[in-house]
Image (cartoon, rainbow, N blue to C red):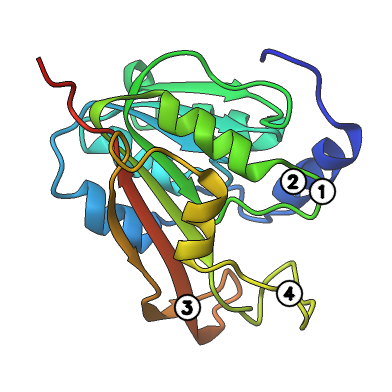
Amino acid sequence: MTGALSPNAESFWEQHHRARRDGGIGRVNPLLKEIAGSLRPGAALDLGCGAGGDTIWLARHGWQVTAVDISRSAVERVRTHSRALGITSRVIGERHDLARSFPAGEFDLISAQYFHTPFTLDRARVLRNGAHALRPGGLLLIVDHGSTAPWSWNRDPDTHYPTPGEIAAELALDAEEWPILRADMPRRRATGSGGQIATVTDNVLLIQRRERRG
């Protein structure tokens, strides 16, 4: 890992991921599966890899994945499962506090799935860093919560979930170089880790880095 960690954020997310009783890998997020499933595999960055479902799914579908999280347990879980599945050559696990450091390299796909935290974080700066780390033609996929699920760690009824348009405005990217391909708020039936079922809203923003013109 590069850069120092924020002790409060680190301990919160470490406790969160250690509390997973089964120690298993998470499910792939459906919007990542929908969008990445039609893409030619390349280099991917999973920002806040968490339970690792997205990283493992991408790697099993031919992507070279850098999995990043502030939690040591989350990163180690991804490494453990990639070894068990024989895909270690396609997975790099890195521990980063993204408030302080960002992974090196260029990527064809950067995935920020539910990249929320109760701690102070200049999220727009992190995501702008991601946009600048895209190769020409690469995609930045941001999927945020648009509603509070019954199993959410954040149950504050006054939470404001920024719309895709608000997120794009915060990023303030040059639309000529980073055009928006998708900005919508689909609803879906979701299942929590305890088996609860609810209808949730996702806020989706898909940005592409334009190919350089000769």
Q: Furthest-right residue in view?
A: 8
The answer for how far apart the CA atoms under marks 1 and 3 are is: 23 Å
Q: Are marks 3 and 4 in contact (CB under 8 Å)?
A: no
Secondary element at tag 3: strand
- Which residue is located at x 42 percent, y 14 percent? 105
Q: Are marks 4 and 1 in contact (CB under 8 Å)?
A: no
Q: Amino acid at mark 3?
A: Thr
Q: Amino acid at mark 4?
A: Thr
Left or right relative to 22: residue 181: left
Secondary element at tag 1: loop
Per the image, the residue denoted by label 2 is 18
Q: Tell me which label, 1 or 3, sits earlier in the chain.
A: 1
Quadrant location, the N terminus: top right
Per the image, the residue denoted by label 1 is 119
Is 74 in front, or is 181? 181
Residue 201 shows which numbered tag? 3
The answer for how far apart the CA atoms under marks 1 and 2 are is: 19 Å
Reply above or below: 177 against 168.
above
The answer for how far apart the CA atoms under marks 4 and 1 are is: 14 Å
Residue 64 in view, yes or no: yes
The answer for how far apart the CA atoms under marks 3 and 4 are is: 14 Å
Instruction: Find residue 39 and report its horizontal and vertical position in percent.
Output: 15, 42
Q: Amino acid at mark 2?
A: Arg
Residue 178 shows which numbered tag? none
Per the image, the residue denoted by label 4 is 159
- Which residue is located at x 47 percent, y 78 percent? 201
Secondary element at tag 2: helix
Q: Tell me which label, 3 or 2, sits earlier in the chain.
A: 2
